[in-house]
Image (tube, rainbow, N blue to C red):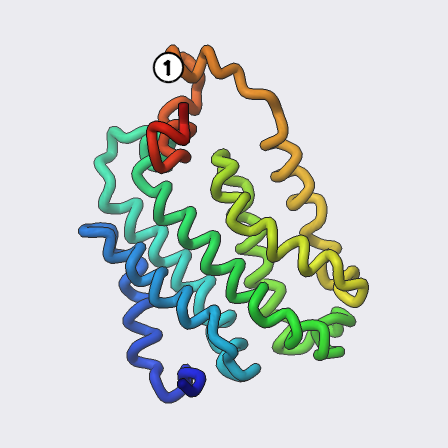
Amino acid sequence: NPSPDVENKTDFVSAMLHLLREPSHDINILSISCLRHLACRKLDEHQWIKLLQSLPQAVAEAETAQCQLFPNNLTEQQRRVLQFQYHRKLSKMMAMLVGSHIGFISADKEIVKNQGGTKHQILSSYLSLLSNILSHPSGRICHEQINTWIALLRDPTMSKLLSPYLQTLLNAYMSHLVRLPWNDVEDGTHELTSLIQTSWEEKEEYD
């Protein structure tokens, strides 16, 4: 099958980006799944840049729209628990859009040399959002991106491009290497108990 033409199917892509706002019946998660399949395809460079440019604004608007639907009495942790699967799938999809097209980055001197052109600015905004997602307290969210960051860091031409994100990247992964007091988690006294329990899909996996 030929690669999807993002430019000529703007209505489809725009619809999926818009549906990121809708949490009922997991519509936002299903829209991420559609975008992930698109991200895995071998897009041409123009199609890829167009998606990189569109996603950050769509994600920001979706986050605002979803938060407005929550009851006012929910704590931040309760909101994170409710949004966990959405954030996990989003983290994976956004990472895959970069990881599946690293060749476009390494082959473009404007991007790798940090020359401040349009494509560099678009990618920088995207990587900034991607790295900000790593601040989520659940290690499962960070885990979804690790292969992409490793692949980027292995390429010596990327050092200048990646330097603004290295501290955030290291802080995020180091913070999840700490030894958790599992007795506190089991007793429900740990401040992130509900989020940690939500981070495992099955009870057997959690146990």
Q: Nearer the viewer, residue 159 or 110?
A: 159
73 lies above or below 168: above
75 over 150 or under it: above or below: above
Q: In what quadrant of the picture does the N terminus appear?
A: bottom left
Residue highlighted by disc 1: 188
Name the one closer to the observer, 16 or 1: 1
**Residue visible at 59% across and 32% down in the picture:** 176
> Residue 200: x and y, percent?
40, 34
How would you rate the neighbour count of disc 1 (Cα within 10 Å): few for under 14, some for 14-19, many for 20 or more?
few
Q: Is residue 19 above or below residue 131?
A: below
Question: Residue 109 at what x, y percent from top left?
Answer: 75, 78
Which of the 4 image quarters holds residue 118? bottom right
Q: Relative to the observer, which residue lies in front, 90 or 54?
A: 90
Locate residue 167 relative to residue 9 in the image: left or right: right
Kind of element beneath mark 1: loop
Q: What residue lies at 35% left-to-right and 61% top-to-bottom? A: 33
**Left or right placement of residue 135 versus residue 64 in this view:** right
Identify residue type, mark 1: Gly
Res 189 → quadrant: top left
